[in-house]
Amino acid sequence: MHARRLIPALVALTCAAAPLQDALADASEAAAVEGATPATRPAAKVLTVLDRIADNITETRYEHRTRIKSREGIYVWDCSAMAAYVIRKAAPAARRALTRERPVARDFYAAIEAAPTRGDREGWRKVAAITDVRPGDVFAWKRPKDFPSRNTGHVGFVLEAPTPAAGWPGAYLVRIADATSLPHGDDTRDPEGGGGFGHGTLLVVSDGAGNGIAYGWFGARSRGVIETPIAFGRLIR
């Protein structure tokens, strides 16, 4: 008797909850879609420029002496030359804020760190937390102290929203586009080639506030991480 009364009640409760469950599912799906899309028009333009480069490459290498012949598909450059080229086409004001004719990685890092998290400073906005990073955003870090390299750091572009890295508490896998001589995890570049432009996956470790504090060059295959602050910036104009 009590069981027969309980079954209709459960059915009624389930039916009443169904619209709420559907709404939550729709909200979750909308959030996922939003995270997968660029946050600004210049960020979307970044992705367009990167696609154009990937589609017409005939030759690419990693070198500090820049040689670009876009009509012929030739892109010989390092990470900062690549980033400056893309930003000049996608966000002219942000490129002008990098006052050096030939900016290096630490200049991009400095521009992001000097920018506010609301509004913008000369076309740049700092992304407050790695969980807010979207496709078309810029990442940059300065060379860690005592790191065996003459480069000033590294810079490139985010292609996909970061995803939590299994087995790495507080860490995220970030699909990126950059120019490098040493391919990342799941990289499009030939490991035996001369490097240059391509896509790969980084591992980024964050602190409790969502700040990037270390990176693993080889993504999920990284055996360790290198500690240095990592800045994420958004192009506004």
Image: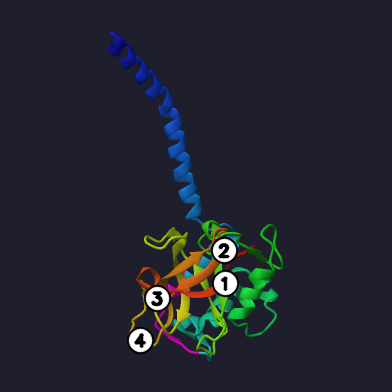
Residue in front for this viewpoint, 170 or 157: 170
Q: Position of residue 161 (x, y in %)?
A: 47, 59
Q: Image point 32% across, 11% down: which residue?
A: 5
Residue 67 drawn in magenta: no
Q: Which residues are magenta?
A: 51-63
> Which residue position is annotated with label 2?
211
Estimate the spatial distance between the alpha carbons at disc 1 and disc 4, rounded to whole Å: 30 Å
Mark closest to the chain's N terminus, 3 or 4: 3
Q: Nearer the viewer, mark 2 or mark 4?
A: 2
> Which residue position is annotated with label 3?
184
Q: Nearer the viewer, mark 1 or mark 4?
A: 1
Amino acid at dot 4: Gly
Which secondary structure, mark 1?
A: strand
Q: Nearer the viewer, mark 1 or mark 3?
A: 1
Estimate the spatial distance between the alpha carbons at disc 3 and disc 4, rounded to whole Å: 13 Å
> Which residue position is annotated with label 4?
193
Mark 2–mark 1 contact, CB under 8 Å? yes
| Mark drawn on residue 176 | none
Mark closest to the chain's N terminus, 1 or 3: 3
| Mark drawn on residue 229 | 1
Query: Is residue 48 visible from the viewing direction of this image?
Result: no
Q: Position of residue 69 (x, y in %)?
A: 50, 85
Residue density around tag 3, few if under 14, some if 14–19, many if 20 or more, within 10 Å: many
Identify the coloring: rainbow
Q: Position of residue 151 (x, y in %)?
A: 54, 86
